Image (tube, rainbow, N blue to C red):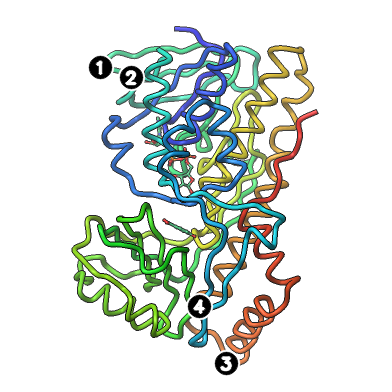
């Protein structure tokens, strides 16, 4: 088998890159380890920056998002018993975010790829990249018990944090930057109306809480829990009681509870690999970096990597600009590190860190109060939350 761009992983990174390339006549094959239903069963993020919204529209997959997504012009920060509105629109000259679940983005991209007739091989195992440092890289993999080979011009490693792409790069060619936080997020999904019409990020001495949503009838709530906590210890009742205890009183009184339809704990981690490429193999999305979810940046960073690689490959195939290939990593990393910083900062000011001394606690509390009390502070929160600009590829 032969293609121009071989993509490992059919998550949002791989599918979006595949769709953009297909639309400009560049051939792709995607190899995915799981079955489509499994990919669609994962509940992930739900806040899209303007840049990602535009990219999805450019890829021709924005119709359902535009019809069903919720445009949010702000969010709330709750702490010390009060609520402060961060007016994203006013603070950023009109920018907003779109509430639309990653699962739905993935569903739309899968449908578009199927309609386009582009090839995705699901349930492939033992995918291995080869000869990435030559101009004839290829992948080997197993499908239905047979060993296959896929020749290509370039490999896109879109296979998430545990994927094979990053792991197949010699470790002495990579530098890893990592921070693991001493807590996780316990999340639930429920068919209840949102407690507030915008997202609420709450700092509380019992721990952080987040009120999010997927639609006007489906909610997503999170609680900070110790890293070693087990989901079995959390009945729905215990979750709702704990959430109420961490919210300002008016919100707690308004909270509508109901049976959970999903409940899980995710660890919090910051992670970046440098560089994000090895010869003709490029790393995108979670394969290259992880952010704690507090800034809602994970999915959006995947989209900016996709935009960068897509625009480079377009110029490579159309204009012979192979000089741009070696710039991929540095261009991505500039934006990645800014989002890493913001996600780390949001995490630091909103969570309760065990074993922090009283002085540090007061400093963090004051940092939050200072930022929200100053227009300059609110502006820097807002411009990061709506998403920093994508770099032009020239
Ligand atoms: N071979 C083939 N496919 C693989 C392999 C492998 N060895 N390893 C992983 N995959 C697949 C996974 O099954 C998954 O479908 O790669 C896909 C990776 O998808 P995601 O983990 O969703 O990563 P990505 O596409 O980069 O999405 C961006 O940002 O913060 C997050 O929640 C956000 O998941 C989202 C991510
Ligand atoms: C979510 O809805 O899942 C969500 C929203 C905002 C975040 C993180 C997660 O910061």
Please name which of the two marks, 3 or 1, marks the residue nearer to the observer: 3
Q: Which of marks 3 and 4 is nearer the N terminus?
A: 4
Q: How crowded is mark 4: few (under 14 residues within 10 Å), some or many (20 or more)?
A: many
- Determine the image quadrant of residue 30: top left
> What residue is shown at x 50% (from left), y 37% (from top)?
167
Mark 2 and mark 1: span between their CA atoms? Answer: 6 Å
Q: Residues within 10 Å of mark 3 (few under 14, many from 20)?
A: few
In which of the image's four quarters is ligand 2 placed?
Answer: bottom left
Give the quadrant of the C terminus: top right
Nearest to the observer: residue 378 or residue 106: 378
Please name which of the two marks, 2 or 4, marks the residue nearer to the observer: 4
Nearest to the observer: residue 172 or residue 144: 144
Instruction: Indicate which disc residue 358 carries.
Output: 3
Location of mark 1 (residue) = 145
The location of residue 106, given as percent across then percent down, is: 40, 35
Instruction: Indicate which disc residue 78 carries.
Output: 4
> What residue is shown at x 56% (from left), y 46% (from top)?
300
Badges 2 and 1: C-beta atoms under 8 Å apart? yes
- Determine the image quadrant of residue 357: bottom right
Badges 2 and 4: C-beta atoms under 8 Å apart? no
């Amino acid at each position: 088998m032969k293609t121009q761009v071989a993509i490992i992983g059919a998550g949002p990174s791989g599918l979006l890159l595949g769709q953009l390339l297909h639309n400009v006549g560049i051939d792709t094959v995607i190899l995915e380890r799981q079955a489509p239903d499994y990919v669609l069963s994962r509940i992930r993020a739900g806040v899209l920056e303007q840049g990602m919204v535009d990219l999805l529209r450019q890829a021709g997959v924005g119709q359902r998002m535009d019809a069903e997504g919720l445009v949010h012009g702000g969010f709330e920060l709750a702490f010390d018993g009060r609520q402060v509105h961060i007016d994203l629109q006013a603070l950023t000259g009109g920018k907003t975010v779109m509430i639309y679940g990653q699962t739905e983005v993935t569903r739309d991209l899968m449908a578009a790829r199927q309609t386009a007739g582009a090839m995705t091989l699901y349930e492939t195992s033992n995918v291995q990249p080869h000869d990435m440092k030559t101009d004839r890289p290829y992948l080997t993999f197993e499908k239905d018990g047979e060993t296959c080979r896929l020749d290509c011009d370039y490999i896109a490693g879109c296979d998430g944090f545990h994927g094979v792409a990053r792991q197949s790069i010699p470790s002495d060619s990579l530098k890893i930057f990592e921070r693991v936080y001493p807590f996780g997020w316990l999340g639930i999904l429920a068919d209840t109306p949102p407690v507030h019409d915008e997202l609420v990020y709450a700092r509380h001495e019992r721990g952080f809480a987040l009120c999010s949503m997927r639609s006007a009838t489906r909610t997503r709530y999170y609680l900070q829990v110790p890293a070693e906590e087990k989901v079995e210890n959390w009945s729905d009742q215990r979750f709702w009681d704990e959430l109420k205890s961490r919210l300002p009183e008016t919100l707690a009184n308004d909270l509508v509870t109901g049976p959970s339809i999903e409940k899980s704990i995710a660890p919090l981690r910051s992670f970046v690999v440098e560089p994000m490429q090895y010869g003709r193999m490029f790393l995108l999305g979670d394969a290259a970096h992880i952010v704690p979810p507090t800034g809602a940046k994970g999915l959006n960073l995947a989209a900016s990597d996709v935009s960068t690689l897509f625009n480079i490959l377009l110029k490579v195939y159309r204009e012979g600009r192979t000089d741009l290939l070696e710039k991929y990593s540095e261009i991505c990393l500039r934006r990645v590190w800014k989002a890493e910083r913001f996600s780390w900062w949001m995490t630091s000011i909103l969570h309760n860190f065990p074993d922090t001394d009283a002085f540090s606690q007061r400093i963090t509390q004051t940092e939050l109060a200072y930022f929200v009390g100053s227009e300059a502070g609110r502006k820097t929160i807002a411009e990061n939350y709506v998403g920093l600009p994508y770099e032009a590829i020239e």
